[in-house]
Image: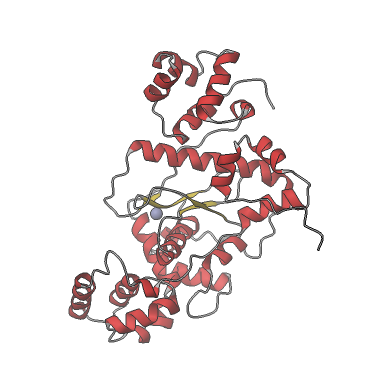
Amino acid sequence: MSNTFNPEMLQLARQFRGFSQSALSKSMSITQGYLSKIENGLMEPAEEMVEAFCKCLSFPREYFFNQDRVYGLPVSVHAYRKKATVPQKTLDAIQAEMNLRIMHYRKLLKSVDLAKDYELPYLDIDQYNGDADEIAFLVRRSWMIPDGPIKNLADFVERAGVLIFVCDFPAGKIDGVTLAIRGMPPCIFLSKNQSADRMRFSLAHELGHLVMHRQPSPTMEDEANKFAAALLMPEKDIFYQLKNISIQSLAALKPVWKVSMGALLYRAGTIGAITKSQSDYMWRQIGSLGYRMREPAELDFPHEKAHLTSEILELHMEDLGYSLEDLMSILGLAPEDFGNLYNFKQKPRLSIVK
Ligand SMILES: [Zn+2]
């Protein structure tokens, strides 16, 4: 642990708590100018000030002396809807949370070898003439995914060494974010506040970015959506099932393919299993039944679970002998945040003699 106060950690903690500079300085009875100078590294806070930050922001002292670097938002943030406007404060809080998680796993991964079952392929979309379907097919091939529906996509993605973090992002704002940074496995952040079918599609979409994109481009979001649809619903496997579809058959296919009725209908249109007028007619029906907002609850299925990040924590406790206090101390986290971020409960070590 270094002796130098890291002003970037202060800014991160403030954003994580959803404070603007002016709000935090007011609640601490200091001037915004003073806070701003500390955050910019122009002034070193005195010891009492550090304690006040700990108290006000609920982070342990060691957190502020962490020397990790902070990353900006990645090239692609997958918004809930194309035109959804996400307020800056929300983006700041999301960015802060991602940074905290990355810092935690950077530390934890020092003691863990991530055994990969598959490689994560890099197939530059420009080398494939923008053909995301072809790339999705190649990913299925290289991971030896059986034909037909993918039973558990999260499992494949984790076995390719990708860390999946399920986060409490504000509902209806951000579905997923991908970060590929040096010295860390690729990380996908998914909002837990989305339906299971949507979360699977978001995961496939983010995987598409990891596989196809190194540079941002105006077409990358469409490409990632095409990739996701093709990965989850390969044309050759699904074409005949999507012929002459009705609301009933969409409802029957949803639990099999584990994608929304909307995604199935959209796919039926793009692969030409139905005509344009059939598609228009079906969309009108979907709309009038209110399924655009909410598909029938009886077709809901459970969310896929990501395991890798909690296994890494468990390994520290069970095999490396870390106590919960040790973990919170090396991660620089208050107990409440630890519980909220990692939904982690220590297994009882003692049991009653029967
Ligand atoms: Zn995206």
Residue placed at 30% from the left, 66% from the top?
A: 294
Residue 273, visible in the rendered structure = no
State the image coordinates of residue 240 (x, y, percent, origin top left): 36, 87
Quadrant assignment, res 247: bottom left
339 sits to left or right of 327 = left
Asked whether, in this view, residue 37 is left or right of residue 313, the answer is left
The quadrant the C terminus occupies is bottom right
Counting from the top left corner in percent of width and height, residue 255 is at 43, 77
* Position of residue 12 measured from the top left corner of the image (x, y, whole percent): 49, 32
Q: How is the image coloured?
A: secondary structure
Vertical placement of 59 versus 128: above or below?
above
The image quadrant of residue 336 is top right
Which quadrant of the figure contains the N terminus?
Answer: top right
Q: Which residue is pictured at 37% across the width and 55% down the height?
A: 220
Question: Would you place residue 175 above or below residue 34 in this image?
Answer: below
Q: Is residue 154 visible?
A: yes
Taking the image in four quarters, ligand 1 sits in the one at: bottom left
Residue at (51%, 65%) from the top-left corner?
304
Q: Nearer the viewer, residue 32 or 140?
A: 32
How many numbered marks does the figure carry?
Answer: 0
